[in-house]
Image (cartoon, rainbow, N blue to C red):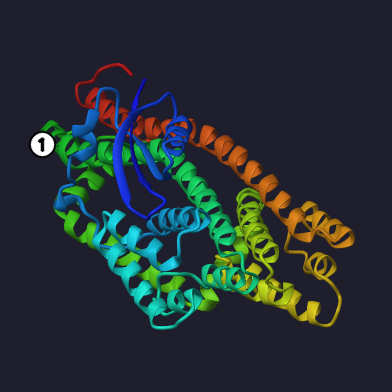
């Protein structure tokens, strides 16, 4: 069985570390709990890893210099665990500071702890850490403080962030192979045009015979690649910079966002992604006591698509006039009909938050299936394109060789 490194807290608030053998991570957590400890982490050390593996210090060279959203998610999960076990907030922060392997995260937690000690609420202390905690995160904590259910809210926050991370990781992992193919394809074409093709130019020039037009084009491309590659690279970088700058313009971003969710091929996928994010965020806020109008305004600011965010703003205004949520969403024509109908059912039954979470689960699954299908189609398409480009270059050279030496084609 594998070994698991664990970190836990005793009832007195003391941090304890060790290694134990268990079949799964859940079994390791159960064993730690049976020892009368509060499990914080249980990570596989590898079979036979032993205590040495658990106690091996991290090299400072590999320590991260910033705080990522993954760090925030882990911190949220651990803080929720400590609070649910009955530890006071101040002591929980002390434990998290000692557990943190990222100096920047430890500094952040210390800043929050100091503000809380100074009399600020947790939500206010988090909000003061500019650019780290989103408005959604802060408002969730504020709702938990108002309702006296901070540990439960933090647990839900951790689950929300873990789901979002799982989706990002799934997409990233799925794109790894296509990205690898794209890089290999570009490198192969660059080597052919910049190194291999120019070697044939003296042969064709010395033969004194006309060569096919396709070969002329390939030779010109090879000369350009070999002699002007700094200019070509600079041009690519300049175009990339200009496009990125243009996308930061609100009007351009609005047009691109509208195109992404309305076009036949990519539209349904991007629409489902945004709908899943909208439904999960709104459902999480509502289930923790945030009013619908306030929750909609928060969701509008957290949405990645400005065209849909504009529609949410209009829905919020309609909601203030007593028209509900589902009907104004349907009138915009910008949201999937299935999701809107499910939201209307949730309004009618008084279970809007539960229905929103069902919408999120439904569209998360659809997005996962759609991504798998798209990537399954993308890989052979990329292989065919790569083969076509490389084949065109090779055939152009071979046809010129045959014409130079009067070989039958």
Query: What residue did someone put label 1 on?
Result: 202
Q: Quadrant of residue 289?
A: bottom right
Residue plotted at (25% across, 56% down): 64
161 left or right of 353 in image: left
Q: Position of residue 143 (x, y in %)?
A: 61, 71
Most distant residue in the right direction? 348
Label 1 neighbour load within 10 Å: few <14, some 14-19, many 20+? few
In the image, 338 versus 249, the foreground residue is 338
The quarter of the image holding the N terminus is top left
Q: Position of residue 94 (x, y in %)?
A: 33, 63
Q: Quadrant of residue 318?
A: bottom right
In the image, 208 versus 293, the foreground residue is 293
- Would residue 254 be visible to someone looking at this image? no
In the image, 227 versus 283, the foreground residue is 283
Q: Secondary structure at mark 1?
A: helix
Q: Position of residue 90 (x, y in %)?
A: 40, 68
Q: Position of residue 384 (x, y in %)?
A: 44, 31
Residue plotted at (12% across, 35% down): 199
């Amino acid at each position: 069985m594998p070994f698991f490194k664990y970190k836990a807290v005793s009832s007195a608030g003391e941090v304890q570390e060790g290694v134990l053998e268990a079949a799964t991570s859940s079994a390791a957590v159960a064993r730690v709990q049976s020892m009368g400890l509060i499990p914080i982490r249980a990570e596989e050390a590898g079979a036979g890893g032993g205590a040495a593996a658990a106690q091996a210090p991290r090299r400072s060279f590999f320590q991260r210099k910033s705080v990522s959203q993954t760090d925030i998610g882990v911190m949220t999960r651990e803080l929720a665990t400590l609070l649910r076990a009955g530890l006071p907030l101040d002591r929980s922060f002390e434990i998290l500071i000692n557990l943190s392997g990222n100096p920047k995260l430890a500094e952040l937690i210390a800043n929050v702890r100091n503000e809380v000690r100074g009399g600020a609420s947790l939500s206010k202390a988090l909000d003061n850490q500019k650019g780290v905690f989103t408005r959604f995160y802060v408002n969730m904590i504020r709702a938990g403080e108002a309702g006296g259910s901070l540990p439960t809210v933090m647990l839900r926050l951790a689950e929300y962030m873990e789901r979002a991370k799982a989706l990002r990781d799934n997409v990233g992992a799925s794109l790894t192979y296509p990205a690898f193919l794209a890089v290999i394809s570009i490198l192969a074409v660059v080597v052919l045009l910049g190194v291999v093709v120019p070697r044939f130019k003296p042969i064709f020039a010395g033969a004194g015979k006309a060569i096919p037009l396709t070969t002329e084009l390939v030779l010109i491309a090879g000369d350009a690649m070999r002699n002007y590659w700094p200019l070509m690279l600079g041009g690519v970088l300049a175009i990339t910079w200009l496009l990125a700058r243009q996308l930061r313009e609100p009007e351009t971003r609005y047009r691109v966002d509208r195109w992404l969710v309305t076009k036949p091929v990519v539209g349904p996928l991007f629409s489902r992604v945004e709908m899943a994010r909208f439904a999960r965020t709104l459902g999480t806020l509502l289930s923790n006591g945030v009013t619908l109008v306030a929750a909609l305004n928060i969701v509008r600011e957290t949405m990645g698509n400005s065209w849909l965010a504009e529609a949410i703003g209009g829905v919020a205004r309609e909601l203030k006039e007593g028209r509900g949520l589902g009907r104004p969403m349907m009138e915009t024509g910008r949201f999937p009909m299935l999701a809107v109908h499910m939201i209307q059912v949730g309004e009618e039954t008084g279970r809007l938050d539960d229905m929103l979470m069902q919408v999120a689960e439904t569209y998360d699954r659809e997005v996962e299936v759609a991504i798998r299908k798209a990537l399954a189609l993308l890989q052979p398409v990329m292989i065919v394109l790569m083969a076509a480009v490389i084949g065109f270059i090779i055939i152009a050279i071979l046809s010129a060789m045959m014409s130079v030496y009067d070989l039958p084609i």
